[in-house]
Image: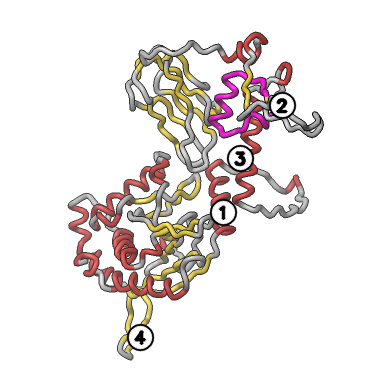
Amino acid sequence: MYDFKFADIGEGIHEGVVLKWEYKIGDVIEEGETLVLIETDKVNAEIPSPVTGTITKLGPPEGEIVNVGETLAVIDDGTTTEKPVSEEKEENGASVVGSIEIGSEVISESNESEDEAKPLLQKVRATPVARKLAKDLGVDITQVTGTGENGRVMKKDIHEVGKQTKQVHQEKQIEKSFIQMPTFDKERTTREKISKLRKTIAENMVLSKSTIPHTTVMDEIIVSDLVDLRRSQKQLATQKEVKLTYMPFIIKALTLSLKEHRIFNSSFDQETDEVIYKNYMNIGIAVDTPSGLLVPNIKDANNLGIFEIAKQIQYIKEKALNKKITLDDLRDGSISITNYGVFDSTFGVPVIKFPEVAIIGIGKIMKKPVVIDDEMVIKEVLPLSLSIDHRVIDGGDAGRFLQTFKGYLGNPMLLLLS
């Protein structure tokens, strides 16, 4: 029998809602096939079966919450294990009360008085289910006060301590400033709970702004040659079933710029005072969805051509809008781009996606009068905003990075020749 637990899938996710069971009790499932679809506060995760076998038990029904460490399914994979005592008997039957003993040694003699002696042996009355759950959630069971018969530690006690530990951990990461809200007229106002995704976005924004000292550099690029190049290649792109926007060119320019300024492709570990340089280029794109903002990234974008990048952009946007984004799509970003030009905006001050060290904001391309060789001419101009982590990137670094970035977009043939 294989007891398949809901494991820690990262990104600070501690629980999920069972959306759909793909199999039922008695079905045979192959290793790697999707067992269940679980909604978390960030993504809808397809959980595959770790083994091949017959399903003998399933976890919570659809619509119910499952916590990390709880059983998703018991699968008969042909292996034999000691038959587990049922949870009900373990938690309610007095005859199966277990205990654990913790201590590195036993004191046989002591010259100290009993009041002065410190016991090195501690017993905890707990079921094997509770002990296993505590281990999965990283809870020290010796610090849990049991509410069961004779002080026995129950599953609910473990979950309660786990929630408190999670809260303390989050408060250590983010120092929240609580402001006393004024009293509002209930008859003239409406309160509405925010979604799980919006709550996560809020927490991430607080984390970014409270951890990263932001500064933003703004500039404009003459991109008339880029506009002409895109216009000349739109027919070819259509033949290849590619939607050719300016974003693929911008991403290509960004990857080439990162090669020359690797500090922008890093993260800062303030616990060890180390800069973590990344040997990959995963470019994040902010996608506006009805549920909130998501920032999936294009993996290894430096290895892709313009048309390939365009296809990847469309692919991840469709995944985001259809709620198909996976945790892998969100992980391991290098640097992100937010395009507020699609909303007819010019400049903004984008917030860095933790733990990245920079983000680029793209405004609306507009025709503007500019001076070239002492003559006033009309050119297409692209507004840019570059927010940086001032702990590891200085203003000079940002200026040099923008010069490189502007060079590629101002002369787009370099994108094809580099």
* CA distance for labels 2 and 1: 53 Å
Q: Which residue has dot 4 on it?
A: 371
The correct choice, above or below, for 168 with respect to 92 in the image is below
The magenta stretch spans residue 146: no
* Foreground residue among 170 and 195: 170
Q: Which residue has dot 2 on it?
A: 109
Residue shown at 32%/50% (left/top)? 299
Is disc 2 surrounded by few (<14), some (14 to 19) or many (20+) residues within 10 Å? few
Residue shown at 67%/10% (left/top)? 94
Q: Position of residue 74 (x, y in %)?
A: 45, 17
* Foreground residue among 211 and 121: 121
Is disc 4 surrounded by few (<14), some (14 to 19) or many (20+) residues within 10 Å? few
Q: Which residue has dot 1 on it?
A: 207
* CA distance for labels 4 and 2: 92 Å
**Between marks 4 and 1 in the image, the one whose residue lies nearer the viewer:** 1
Q: Position of residue 44 (x, y in %)?
A: 45, 36
Q: Amino acid at mark 1?
A: Leu
* CA distance for labels 3 and 1: 15 Å
Q: Which type of secondary structure does the marked residue at label 1 adopt? A: helix
Q: Which callout, 3 or 2, points at the residue further toward the start of the chain?
A: 2
The magenta-colored residue range is 123-144
Q: Amino acid at mark 4?
A: Val
* CA distance for labels 4 and 1: 42 Å
* CA distance for labels 3 and 4: 57 Å
| Disc 4 + disc 1, Cβ < 8 Å | no
Q: Position of residue 269 (x, y in %)?
A: 49, 56
Locate residue 159 relative to residue 313 in the image: left or right.
Answer: right
Q: Which type of secondary structure does the marked residue at label 3 adopt? A: helix
Q: Which residue has dot 3 on it?
A: 166
